[in-house]
Image: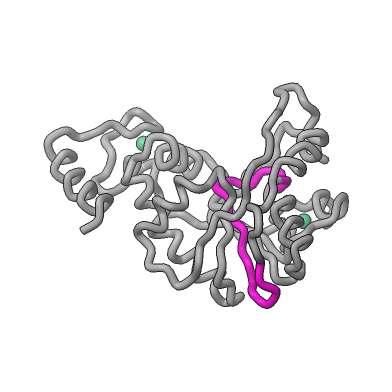
Amino acid sequence: MNFYKRLFYADAAAHFLFPEVCGMCENNFIEHGLPLCKNCFSDSVGFQEKGRCKKCGELLYNSSCSVCSSRKIYFNKAFFLYNYKNREKHIFKMAKFENRHRAVNFFTENFLNYLKQLLPQNINYILALPSSKPFLEKLLSFVKQDFQVDFPFIVIKKKQSKFMHAKDRFLMIENTLSLKENYKLQKNIKYCIFDDVFTTGATLNSAAKLCNENGVLIKNIYVAALLRRDKKGIDSL
Ligand SMILES: [Zn+2]
Ligand SMILES: [Zn+2]
């Protein structure tokens, strides 16, 4: 029994003795095995593609995509598990920052379905961004892997001003990723680059660009994120 499974059983006992209040509504007790109370945890619908760009998931405006029409996109298609909504955001934060196993569990179960979405594309190699490493490793400890996972990217520098214009931030992030020295990508393999949350897609696109510069055809590069966040309040790029 792995560490997280043992935790799950310990949690069942603790739950019985000390019921916990839902962190989202702070009204009801959480359901056993779920990260939230029953009200907050109503059935999930998954990522809603309607009205969105089929390639990058951006909300369309006058049936055109402001992201894809304003820059070169170095990936074939982006996959998302959920829209970044209240419930998912809450559970994600619990899973990533508080290491709450019930929340990790939630993503694990759904991650399996998510991978089935990717696998018909014959993607057998997942390249993960450094920022997603702790979380992805946690998820993968549950999931029987039919594919390889690697962490080939390194961050060269990360200097961001809070006041930086979104456009500058896009350009800046482009300079921060690099492939590990001597890392070889294989020409005839389909890769999927993974990150936790996709907002502007700048980091994933620059990772995809790196792969393309290192010999992978754009049609063989996919990107994936657990959550697709809409850039509300950020100027469109
Ligand atoms: Zn609740
Ligand atoms: Zn697009």
Does the rendering let one see residue 47?
no
Nearer the observer, 82 or 25: 82
Give the magenta range.
Answer: 185-202
Which residue: 43% across, 64% down? 112
Residue 234: say if magenta.
no
In this view, the residue in front, 122 or 25, is 122
Where does the image place residue 197, in percent across and percent down from the top left? 58, 46
Total numbered circles: 0
Relative horizontal placement of residue 175, taking residue 118 as reference (left or right):
right
Q: Give left or right: position of 2 versus 169.
A: left
Q: How is the image coloured?
A: one colour
Quarter placement of the C terminus: top right
Spot the residue most to the front: 182
Left or right placement of residue 167 versus residue 210 in this view: right
Q: Tell me the quadrant of ligand 2.
A: bottom right
State the residue lying farthest toward the right.
70
Rendered residue at 51%/62% (across/down): 149
Residue 42 coordinates in the image, percent (x, y):
40, 49
Q: Indicate whether 13 appears above or below 21.
A: below
Q: Residue at x 32, y 45 (%)?
A: 101
Residue 67 at what x, y percent from top left? Answer: 80, 50
Return the residue nearer the eye: 199 or 176.
176
Residue at (20%, 58%) from the top-left corner?
Answer: 1
Residue 23 image position (x, y, % from top left):
36, 32
Does the magenta portion include 187?
A: yes
Q: Is residue 79 visible?
A: yes
Residue 26 lies in what quarter of the image? Answer: top left
